Amino acid sequence: PALGRFTQPDTVLPEPGDPQQLNRFAYVRNNPLRFTDSTGHRIDPGGDQGLPKPTQPPPPPPPPPPSFAPPLDAILSRSPDYIALDVSAWVVNVNVTVDSALNLYVASGWTKGASMFPVTAQFVMGWLCEQDPTPGRIQNFLEGDYVSISEGAVVGGGSTVSRTGVAVEVGVYFPPQVSMTAGHAWHVGQGSFVAAP
């Protein structure tokens, strides 16, 4: 023991036929003073074969992945980011939108849908799927190419996807319809086109 090494062979043979077990003191790294089982007769309750226990606590679990969109009730609890009037005739679609900063957008595109009538209309309110978007962020969303999918029978809803995000929409639909529209929107007027109160 003064040497810090075993002075006689262990009387317990783990597996006599296994050549990996020829060093019969390997399970305590051949050091009886530091690794607590100098006799070799004690069963290790932890299953760590006599190796030292870690002194530091395990690292904390990783944080959960970030949420890419706030919950729907948080989105719908604020005022709409935009309102839009959408009219489709056969396969042609025209859209006029005003955002919360009173910017005006005009869009046109193609539509495919199911309705009892060849001409349909929608008046919708839309919310970007993010927490409190800025006016600039709303403008980036409403300009450019977009795809919109909606369904309504008097009251309905849908979703619009643009190059910069996703929005949910709720509104009034006439006549009952299911439609998908792809188009392009242009920003045609600043908020100053509306007379100040």
Image (cartoon, rainbow, N blue to C red):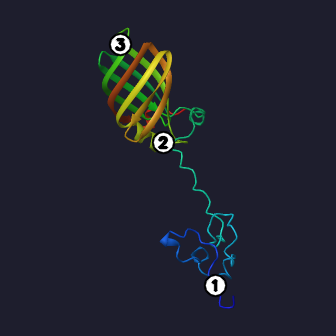
Residue 187 vs residue 151: left or right? left
Residue 7, by quadrant, is bottom right
At numbered mark 1, what does the secondary structure look like: helix, strand or loop? loop
At numbered mark 3, what does the secondary structure look like: helix, strand or loop? strand
Residue 31, by quadrant, is bottom right
The residue singled out by tag 1 in the image is: 8
Q: Which is more N-terminal, label 1 or label 3?
A: 1
In the image, what residue type sits under mark 2? Pro
Residue 76's x, y, as percent? 57, 32
Residue plotted at (57% across, 76% down): 26
Categorize mark 3 by other alpha carbons within 10 Å: few (<14), some (14-19), many (20+): some
The residue singled out by tag 3 in the image is: 119
In the image, what residue type sits under mark 1? Gln
Query: Which marked residue is nearer to the observer: mark 2 or mark 3?
Result: 3
State if disc 1 and disc 3 touch (CB < 8 Å). no
State if disc 3 and disc 2 touch (CB < 8 Å). no
Q: Is residue 124 above or below residue 73?
A: above
Query: Which marked residue is nearer to the observer: mark 1 or mark 2?
Result: 1
- What's the distance in space between the residues labelled 3 and 1, CA to CA? 98 Å
Categorize mark 1 by other alpha carbons within 10 Å: few (<14), some (14-19), many (20+): few
In the image, what residue type sits under mark 3? Val
Residue 20's x, y, as percent? 49, 72
Residue plotted at (59% across, 73% down): 27
Residue 15 vs residue 163: left or right? right
Q: Which is more N-terminal, label 3 or label 2?
A: 3
Q: Nearer the viewer, residue 185 or 111?
A: 111
Residue plotted at (49% across, 23% down): 157
The residue singled out by tag 2 in the image is: 135
Residue 93's x, y, as percent? 33, 22
How many numbered tags mark residues here? 3
Categorize mark 2 by other alpha carbons within 10 Å: few (<14), some (14-19), many (20+): some
